[in-house]
Image (cartoon, rainbow, N blue to C red):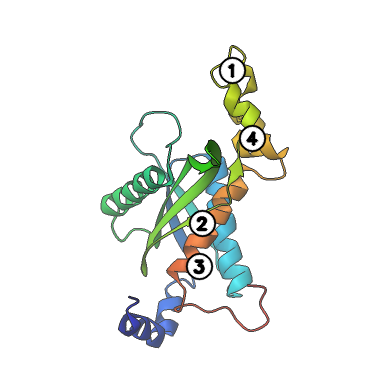
Amino acid sequence: MVSFCRLEIMSSNLKEFLGRYQRGIEVCVAGGGADTLLGVRDAFRRYFHEGLERPVPVAVVPQEMPPRPTGLPVSDLEALETARRTARELEARLPGTYHFYLANEACIHSLEIEGQSRYFIRSWSVLVGVAGESCGSSGSIQLPQRLVESLEGVHAEVEIPGKRKSGGTIASLTGGLETRRSAVATATLHALSTLFYGILESRRGSIR
């Protein structure tokens, strides 16, 4: 159940709450990939500049994390658990240093449709901030079935899309219409919208 008392307290202190950001917003992001950093910045700028009409500066600060096994998580739950753990580790390592701590994790998830497994890729963002914690995801894109069926074949290395130099899996599957950056931005925007729902409201006439 939503704590209406908590929302009422936050709303009553809204002016003071927003005043903390007048000199800018600082976001600590796990990892230093350019696509992730730019995607996070895009989301914050869109939410605060376009949604709230508050054009405050947004600084996105990368924070290197210990290396971990390569490869994508194979479920939404695994991706969320990893991202939540990472975001909380950032907060514990640098308490009170930044306004927000964020981790993003892409994953492959599957659905059984008429007895056949279909595989999808999407991005998850976990955001920890003054109002608590929230999660958001990008849209899913299905891996072509012929690609899935070829993964164990001799041409699998050639068939698999998503080389970093070509913009990643999403860019490869969409011909560049969507990218890793836009997926991170969408996931982060969704997390921001949940985090501040009922606390920060867009102004009448804004596009959000």
Q: Work out how far the residue at label 3 is from the one at label 4, CA to CA, in angstroms.
A: 27 Å
Amino acid type at mark 3: Ser
Question: Secondary structure beneath disc 4?
Answer: loop
Measured from the top left, where is residue 144 in percent x and y? 64, 34
- Mark 3 nearby-residue class (10 Å; few <14, some 14–19, many ≥20): some
> Is residue 12 visible to the viewer in this orientation of the structure?
yes
Is residue 110 rendered to the left or right of residue 84? Answer: right
Quarter of the image holding residue 6?
Answer: bottom left
In primary-sequence order, the first of circles 3 and 1 is 1
Q: Residue at x 65, y 27 (%)?
A: 146
Amino acid type at mark 2: Thr
The residue at which mark 3 appears reads as 193
The circle drawn on residue 157 is 1
Measured from the top left, where is residue 73 in percent x and y? 42, 37
Q: Quadrant of the C terminus?
A: bottom right
Is residue 3 rendered to the left or right of residue 142? Answer: left
The circle drawn on residue 167 is 4
Measured from the top left, where is residue 46 in percent x and y? 61, 64
Q: Residue at x 31, y 54 (%)?
A: 91
Amino acid type at mark 1: Glu
Q: Residue at x 64, y 22 (%)?
A: 159
